[in-house]
Image: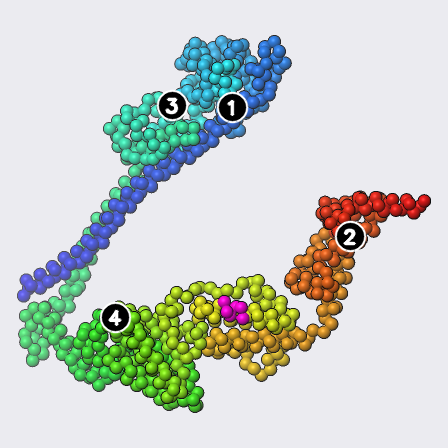
Amino acid sequence: MIRRRKSVFLTLWLSYILILIIPVTVSAILYTNMENTMVQNASRSNLAMLEQVRQIVDNHLQEIDQMTVQIATHPKLQTLWTIEESEKYIQYDEAVKALKNIRSGTGFVNDFYIHLRKQDVILSPTLKTDTDTFFTQLYPYESKSLEQIRSELLSGYHFKTFWPVTGIKDNSNSKKVIQTAVSLPLGENENVWGTLVMNIEDQQIFNLLKQIEWAGSGQMYIIDDNGRVILSTTGGFDLPGGLFEEIVSDSGYRKYRAEGVESILSHTTGQSGWKYVSLVPEKVLLERVNEVKSWALTLLGLAIAAGAIVAYWMAYRSYSPIRDMMVAIMNGKQAADKPLLVNEYEFIKTSIAETLAEGKEMKQKLEGHIPVVRTYFLSRLLKGQADAEALEEQSLQFMGVRFPHEYVCVVLIEVDESSEFIRDGSEREWALARFILFNTSSELIGERGYVTETERNRLALLLNVPDAEDETKRERDGMLEQLKRLIEERFRMNISIGISSIRSGVAETGRCYGEALNALDYRIIHGVSSVIHFEQIGEMERAYYHYPIETEAQLMNVMKSGEYEEAVRLLDELYERNVATHGMTPEMGKTLFFDLLSTMLKVMNALKLDEKRLFGNAPDPVKLIFNSKSAEDMHSKIKGICSAICHSVREARTDQTGRLNERLRRYIEDNYADNALSLTSIADHFGMTPQYVSGLFKKQNGVNLTDFMVEVRLREAKRLLGDPRLTVLQVAQQVGYATDIGFIRVFKKVEGITPGKYRETLLQAAEMKDG
């Protein structure tokens, strides 16, 4: 027995360790993926920094191109190769001054000079000298003779030609530069007069390369479009063997073995065709990754050790109750009618047997409560809280529930109108109504489903049907139509029915119940005492309704004007477009009508209408709409509110419109000189909409407001044009025009002549009058 107990303990411990191994394995897999991701990120980071260097150098190369064009097209410099020696009107010192004014924007070009081949002269921003003096005394090369310079640099045709880093001496100071040459004039490869040479200090590019994190630990190369190494951090100008074939693509990164060392090769290509290559040892690039890896392995080892200890403790703790129970059994503490327990499993077996016996006893007690249990189960099943597929067949049989077919459908029946059956609305009468509905429904569906109460005035039918074919649907609809006709004709109760779709599996009951609820909600659109199928509304649901701001503004304006017929036309159009087509959800329908009610309340507030005087003892408008049972009812009540508002507006309107018209005319005549005067500003001044002001003015005066404003301004302008001391611009500004251009255009459009011609006519008439 001791050996068996030890084996149980060992089994528990190994089980816990096995559970521990699962997350450890998953963590190892995740870490491997994370490590690969970190390697990829490190490589991408290195390439991104190389891309930044490439972009900066490309920008500087574009600057060199711009500088070349600036020098080649400078008018004073062009004469050096466009005018014959005997005809030159420019002195060399003027050319030097012109070069001095041309400088690189960022100082990327250290210095530059022009070599004139026919004269064998060097011109720079600081001096003019001959070629021998310049290259032997002023700018001697460390590794090139004068003959090499003449043959490579100063002869032949060059267009954006670059040479690798070379050393020169400048004022006794040595420096290394990258040289580029362009033949002048630009584009002349036969008749070349000179060469523009620019020097770029390699230190400027080295400073850019230092921004790359691993630049000091690897090798950096810049290769021109001819495949020559222009610059390298190694000081050499030869690529490692086979490297050039690895960088034929525009950009990318990959592993590469250079001189026996595993490295990460990154490269990118600039707009000029230069290639920027980075070769970093893998151990340098992945130094941080390896640090994380060592820490992760250390922590993993500690976690495994700690997990083994915790597993041992949990196994010991789990085994302790079994051990204690076995000790109690061995000490004779077990009941006398129980057999002697020989091991832990026997004890568990006995406990299970006792539990089953208690279950049978409990089942006997529950047999008297089967209807209540069945109702509770069906309610939970409809609401998706019970998993019927997880229940055993025996449990379903115990509750009297059986689902012989695969498909289910839920039907909700709700009492809409019962005033002829229920007189005082007492609970006793409602209980009787539910009893009638329950029994009538149960008789009609028979063995095809179950009926349960969900609310005070609502029942749910859970139908179990063999398939989802059209014949089954017609049979179901016929049964429900018969039930509806029987309830309405015999018991005088109007009912609405919401029918879900037919779905496969009892597990879909909760979803069917939700569909039936959604269908029943559409009663507000279809009206009371209707039968609504979920399939009919599925394709009509949308998340919005049509009530644009323009329509609301138009509705508010016509109500403020008391035009009830126009307001009703707008309301009917909104109802037809949104509701009559059954193309919106009940929630959107309610929101639409509350939005319309909000418009009514805005108009009442704007007109300062007294609600009690307007509606008398009628219910509050919000409650009136909220208690409506259908969209048609809401629409009728909204039109009633609109009628009351329009009637009140018409009663209050006497000579108010005439007084407002006089105020508008007076305001225009007093402010015509303001160039900001417009229909919008006038409407804002009077607190009205531009459309309302325009319509009112047109109706009262027979002319548009803007035309009247032009008439007042031109009348004053004609008077001012009689004064010859005023210019046309001054006249335009005094009558409200910012410039004389708009004034002249309007004047000519209305009078047929320009203001100047009109003034000439006035002056001629005055002269004729004076004799």
Height in image: 619 above or below 250? Answer: below
Find residue 567 and report its horizontal and vertical position in percent.
Answer: 59, 70
Is 268 left, or right, of 402 in this rendering?
right
Find residue 354 and report its horizontal and vertical position in percent.
Answer: 13, 77
**Mark 2 sits on what residue?**
714
**Residue at mark 1 to residue at mark 3: CA–CA distance:** 21 Å
Tell me, yes or no, whether the highlighted magenta stretch contains residue 576.
yes
N-term-proximal mark, 2 vs 3:
3
N-term-proximal mark, 2 vs 4:
4
Task: Residue type at mark 4: give it.
Answer: Asp
Task: Residue type at mark 1: give it.
Answer: Thr
N-term-proximal mark, 2 vs 1:
1
Task: Residue type at mark 2: give it.
Answer: Leu
Tell me, yes or no, whether the highlighted magenta stretch contains residue 430.
no
**Mark 1 sits on what residue?**
68
Q: Look at the numbered discs 2 and 3 and tell me whether their residues touch, using CB distance below 8 Å.
A: no
Dominant secondary structure (helix, strand or loop) of the stretch shown in magenta: helix
Q: Look at the numbered discs 1 and 3 and tell me whether their residues touch, using CB distance below 8 Å.
A: no
Q: Which residues are magenta?
A: 572-577
Find residue 118 and report its horizontal and vertical position in percent.
Answer: 52, 10
- Label 2 sits on a secondary structure element that is helix
